[in-house]
Amino acid sequence: MQKITVQSKPIAGQKPGTSGLRKKTHVFMESHYLENFVQAIFAAIGGVGGKTLVLGGDGRYFNDRAAQVILRMAAAGGAAKVIVGQGALLSTPAASNLIRTRNTDGGIILSASHNPGGPQEDFGVKFNTPNGGPAPEEVTNRIYEATKAVTSYDIYETHDADLSQVAITTMGNMEIEVVDPVTDYRALMEKLFDFDAIAALIAGGFTLRFDAMHAVTGPYAKAILEGALGAPEGSVINAVPSPDFGGGHPDPNPIWAKPLVDLMMGEDAPDFGAASDGDGDRNMVLGRGVYVTPSDSLAVLAANAHMTPGYKGGLKGVARSMPTSRALDRVAAARGLDCYETPTGWKFFGNLLDAGRATLCGEESAGTGSDHVREKDGLWAVLMWLNILAETKVSVAAIMDRHWREFGRNYYSRHDYEGLDKTAAEAMLDDLRARLPDLPGQSFAGLTVASADEFAYDDPVDGSHSAGQGLRIGLAGGERIVFRLSGTGTAGATLRVYLEAVEEDPARLDRPTDEALADVIAAADAIAGIEKKTGRTEPDVRT
Ligand code: VG1
Ligand code: CO
């Protein structure tokens, strides 16, 4: 085994986005691409010498190769130890948990989350800090600066580390501890939720289906839902992680998890349905005949968390990303909880969780989580729902009905326009930004603008300022429209339009969402000129 120094030079465009660096897999496989970025991570944390890291990923194509490269670079950099999931697998929340419980110096997660995988699809690398959370902007900025200064990197020339067995091995002076990816995570879930109550619910005939979408939660859901909680074999489907996620998008929404949605809307629907994404941090929840929007799910969990052992003492506060519907705010107001509004991306919740200001957080993009880790957590949300269902002993539909009657309903939808020309999409938002001051008082599609601004965030804990976080339009009837460009895509630009209308009339709580939002959708197009400026008449994805 020999340590070598490889000469390299900066590669343009290695700027982490909403959640790490995401590029086409073949880009990551180009010579020096992965190595340069890893070198920049090491540089940004003051070198890897003497440090302990966690390493794992969602099992997508190139996950195993990238893990070997990172191990050889960590060993060459003098790292003390790397804790790796068996087979180089770790769900994002499980990695966050290991980083925290093992008091490590952080971790590297290999994932492009809900983006498809394979040689022609996407790959990603993300660094999480010692609190277990995604690196905050200050750190990702440092990483980006370091990518612009790479001149060389150190790496061992040696054979692959054996990651197939749970064992402790070494590479040079570095220890490699291969752990079962599920064990610690399952133990954490057992502490938070009443497994006996959920098992009794299932034993009493309650049926469920969990779609792991050929991604990383398969082994976790099998071990917990079927193993520990006694759901019959076959309750967890698509449970074996595959490098290309069975050719699909591992994105738990009504488009990409349509077979599950069809099942839940059909004659033979089980009582409960759920799905998770590539790296296991997102969740979709359904009941028989009902799809629960992620924003509503967050509000329901906040309203009922006290029924579960881990949260029986109540919540310290709650937080949501700005585009997430304000259903959560209604629960917070009714229960006297502080409610924070942050920019998109889980990294902005970290300080609130660390400071004990928030217990529960969520995003409209199917992310919910709590202070048990510092990432959103798909299976956690599913277990919390099951625990609440075991306590209330009513259906998902009944929980939603009761919730809306008590708090009112925020009809909500997100429209995504994918693969837009980047320059044109940016020009459209630049134009809208320039018009914001003139919008209040003007009417569009029969709705009058009450407020218009660009969201910026001042972190209440460390005072950091994040500008340019989405254009917000408030309408006189309480409706709201948000426009922003995605920061996780790998081709062109994706415009996200977030649409929300508030309903407090008990007679109007059961309307189809598209109907309830029809005016807001028309106003969004009129305000931004989407059709005129992009040529698109319909979004590619509605969630
Ligand atoms: C999207 C979502 C955002 C989420 C992020 C990472 O970002 O909108 O809410 O935090 O993905 O999720 P963007 O910039 O494309 O809108 V995951 O499950 O990819 O780690
Ligand atoms: Co994800």
Image: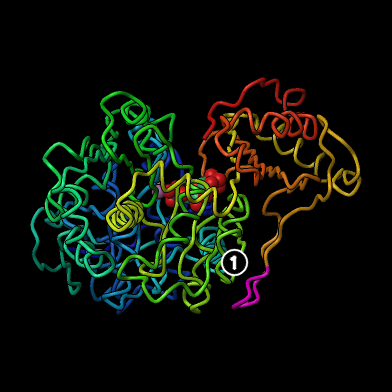
Q: Left or right? Give the position of 51 relative to 521.
A: left
Residue shown at the point (77%, 48%) measured from the top left: 474
**Figure check: 419 above or below 49:** above
Q: Position of residue 34 (x, y in %)?
A: 39, 51
Q: Left or right? Give the position of 248 relative to 325.
A: left
Location of the N terminus by quadrant is bottom left
Count of marks, rendered view: 1
Residue 400 in view: yes
Q: Is residue 513 magenta?
A: no
Q: Left or right? Give the position of 228 relative to 52.
A: left
Residue shown at the point (41%, 41%) measured from the top left: 397
Question: Disc 1 marks which amino acid?
Answer: Cys
Please tell me in which quadrant of the rendered image residue 509 appears: top right
Foreground: 27 or 102? 102
Please tell me in which quadrant of the rendered image residue 248 appears: top left
Residue shown at the point (40%, 38%) measured from the top left: 251
Please tell me in which quadrant of the rendered image residue 61 appears: top left
Q: Position of residue 522 (x, y in %)?
A: 73, 28
**Figure check: 7 above or below 175:** above
Q: Left or right? Give the position of 55 relative to 171.
A: right
Per the rendered image, the range of residues in magenta is 458-464
Q: Secondary structure at mark 1?
A: strand
Q: Position of residue 461 (x, y in %)?
A: 59, 78
Q: Position of residue 162 (x, y in %)?
A: 11, 56
Residue beneath disc 1: 339
Foreground: 513 or 429? 513
Residue 11 in view: no
**Figure check: 23 above or below 154:** above
Foreground: 93 or 299? 299
